Image: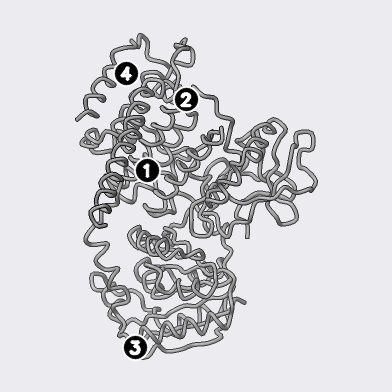
Amino acid sequence: MNQFPGSPAGQPLEASFRDPNGFIFSYEGQIYRQINLQYQENYSHLVDSGLYDALLKAGLIVRHEEVNIPAVLPDRVYKIIQPDPLRFVSYPYEWSFSQHKDAARATLQIQKTALKFGMSLKDCSAFNVQFHGGRPCLIDTLSFEIYQEGKPWVAYRQFCQHFLAPLSLMAYRDMHLSQLLKIDLDGLPLDFTSRLLPWHTRMVPALLLHIHLHAASQKRYASAGSMKLDSNRQVSRNAMLGLIDSLDSAIQRLEWRRTATSWADYYRADHNYTPEALAHKKQIVIEYLEKIKPGIVWDLGANTGMFSRLASERGVFTLAFDSDPGAVELCYRESRSKNEKLLLPLLQDLTNPSPGIGWQNQERAGLIERANADAIMALALIHHLAIGNNLPFDRLASFFRRLGRWLIIEFVPKDDSQVRRLLAAREDIFYDYTIESFEHAFQKKYLIQRVEQIRGSDRRLYLMEGR
Amino acid sequence: MFSFIWMGLLINGIFLSAPSKNPPLYLDPGSGSYIFQLIIAALVGGAFVVKMYWSKISGFFRKLFNRDTDDTQE
């Protein structure tokens, strides 16, 4: 597993180069953060003021311990800390609407708490937030600086670009626009967002202020670096609190507009099964999981997470991937309401998985680089990939094998009503879509350990172990 | 209603108060955001103070009302 690519032991990670105050590095298979001398005063204030403890208690920052190991750059080192390891690093373009919204509100809560302790966030990148134990928390311990009353919030623009802009586009235009964050790693430019938002959003005071007027003022005052500013003008503490409060209200009011087509089907998930067949399928999956006892499961095509929960409710950290933002949203909402700590729903199109992006394609890792599963679940999925996307069985077997050792996979035969529906509007060119070809192709990569036919159905569930 | 009046004044402030003679060749959105906060500081700060006082006043009356209800029940 390599969640942070390009990191020889004892070297700063390829993705960790922007902040002069410190960097992440790996050492003997563990992840550490070096804090440089220039950040000493801020780090001491974070810990000594009680801010770190307050954020930790609220579950808003990742826990860390100060450790004594060799520094990567000894002439600059102040301290080395070891943060709690993350089970999986996810990115904002993989989050559902509510995940992004919760990450935004957590960031504002952190800023509000920081001000109480005389500090302020100097970075507001959505990439600094990770879902840890089911809830969003800040992973960049070096994001704080000592607050100077009167000074504007240096991370205001970044907050608007990373949170308010994508969320407002998702709420007022389309859920898929979260994918724009793959193009602009420092968030969506506000002039661009202002142009894409419907005109009537100018009637929403918070969006008029923080997006439209903000964008216009950026353009107007862009050259103000050289302009002499009126030194009497300040942003008081109340103004700073007002700014945060206004942003929080703006975020809070943004809601996902449900589309009838996408939501209608979720409640009828697995409608192809009789209650008896569904119960039997669950029973077989549970038996397989109990046999292999995985540490991490990736459920591919998880829909709203019905089968992912069979794993997470048994103490297994489970990633529930689906390509439909609606399914991921519903899965997250249920997970949040049940306070599920071991289930992480994420948006992922398996036919076009998240690529490695940023500087040297290494700042944000691609999906396959982050593969860390012990077991892959691919239930009611194979026909979508093989028939819906013309993917041959041998390529699918290779792909699944790259992601993890064990595979729980359901074969859906051609005469199944779901497959017939896929073939209804197209010519059947899938002569190899047979159970024999499926087994033959997968046996090149896997040993078939068990096969069970689902009662009252022609579908089969396989348990395979990677060769 | 008040928010729209505020907005009107603000738009005036942003677009009419400081003339922009030469469009810049190099655009730095960070500087714009910085100055924008100085311009909107009074608006958001004022709104925040009003909101705080309003919640205190409404909280006071809510308590008073609840106490009256409790007294009646006794």
Q: Which residue is mark 2?
A: A152
Please report whichever mark, 3 or 1, sits nearer to the chain's N-terminal start.
1
Viewer-nearest residue: A416 or A363? A363
Give the distance between the C-alpha atoms of the residues marked 2 and 4, in whole angstroms: 17 Å
Disc 4 and disc 1 in contact, CB within 8 angstroms? no
Give the distance between the C-alpha atoms of the residues marked 3 and 1, in whole angstroms: 43 Å
Query: Mark 1: which secondary structure?
Result: helix
Please report whichever mark, 2 or 1, sits nearer to the chain's N-terminal start.
2
Viewer-nearest residue: A271 or B58? B58
Residue drawn where x is 51% and y is 67% of the image = A318
Query: Mark 2: which secondary structure?
Result: loop
Q: Position of residue A168 (x, y in %)?
A: 32, 42
Q: Which residue is mark 3?
A: A276
Viewer-nearest residue: A435 or A78? A78
Q: Which mark is residue A57?
A: none
Q: Which residue is mark 4?
A: B14
Q: Amino acid at mark 3?
A: Glu
Q: Position of residue A448 (x, y in %)?
A: 55, 84
Residue drawn where x is 48% and y is 29% of the image = A153
Q: Amino acid at mark 2?
A: Pro
Depth check, mark 2 against mark 1: the one in front is 2
